[in-house]
């Protein structure tokens, strides 16, 4: 026991043990900070995505499906609109959302190709809910045969 005291006594006198203990305590702190910042960066860059659809018109000749994705400025509703109708007919999709200020907004897209899907995308910002409806119509307007409003996204599940 005396030999151990003799070895520690000179270290304590020179202050070297205090420097070693401070150095050892400080070493893990930057590693923990780096791990914490890496975790925070991965959660910020990872966007959440929710799938919706397919939603079909009442005659099943037009349908849409897509995703809702979180962005840095709110949410984005995106998807594809399909048209399987005959000549001179089109499929229409209407996205309706309730903003965080309590106002409804809409965006409407059409596809008259009858062979290729049309991609659509709308930045909704911060919203409380979103709905989608697919209708049939001409190249200029909706004529009817609409689906019911399908809830695409709701805050809180």
Image (tube, grey):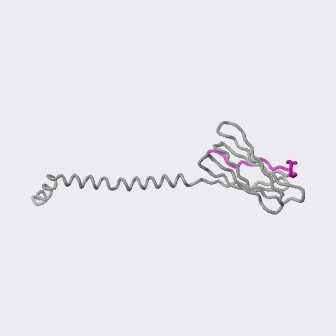
Residue shown at the point (73%, 46%) measured from the top left: 131
Residue 80 locus on image (x, y percent): 74, 57
Q: Which one is nearer the viewer's eye here, 1 or 143?
A: 143
Q: In which image quadrant can residue 4 be found?
A: bottom left
Q: Is residue 38 left or right of residue 93?
A: left
Q: Position of residue 82 (x, y in %)?
A: 79, 58
Above or below — where is 55 with respect to 115?
above
The answer to whether 76 appears left or right of 87 in the picture is: left
Residue appearing at x 19%, y 54% in the figure: 16
Q: Say whether residue 153 is magenta.
A: yes
Region rendered in magenta: 138-157
- The chief SS type of the magenta part is loop
Tell me the quarter of the image containing the N terminus.
Answer: bottom left
Q: Residue furthest top?
A: 102
Could you say which quadrant of the image residue 9 lies in? bottom left
Name the residue: 64% across, 48% down: 75
Which residue sits furthest bottom?
115
Locate residue 64 relative to residue 6 in the image: left or right.
right
**Image point (76%, 55%), residue name:** 64
From the top left corner, tell me how far across and down residue 43 is, in percent.
52, 53
């Amino acid at each position: 026991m005396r030999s151990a005291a003799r070895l520690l006594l000179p270290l304590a006198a020179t202050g070297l043990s205090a420097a070693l203990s401070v150095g050892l305590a400080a070493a893990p702190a930057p590693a923990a900070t780096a791990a914490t910042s890496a975790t925070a960066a991965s959660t910020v860059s990872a966007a959440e995505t929710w799938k919706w659809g397919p939603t079909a018109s009442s005659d099943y000749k037009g349908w849409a499906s897509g995703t809702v994705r979180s962005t840095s400025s709110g949410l984005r509703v995106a998807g594809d609109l399909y048209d399987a109708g005959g000549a001179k007919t089109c499929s229409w999709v209407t996205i309706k959302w309730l903003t965080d200020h309590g106002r409804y907004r809409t965006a409407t897209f059409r596809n008259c190709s009858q062979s290729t899907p049309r991609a659509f995308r709308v930045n909704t910002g911060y919203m409380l809910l979103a709905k989608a409806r697919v209708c049939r119509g001409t190249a200029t307007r909706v004529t009817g045969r609409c689906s019911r409003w399908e809830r695409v996204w709701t805050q809180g599940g």
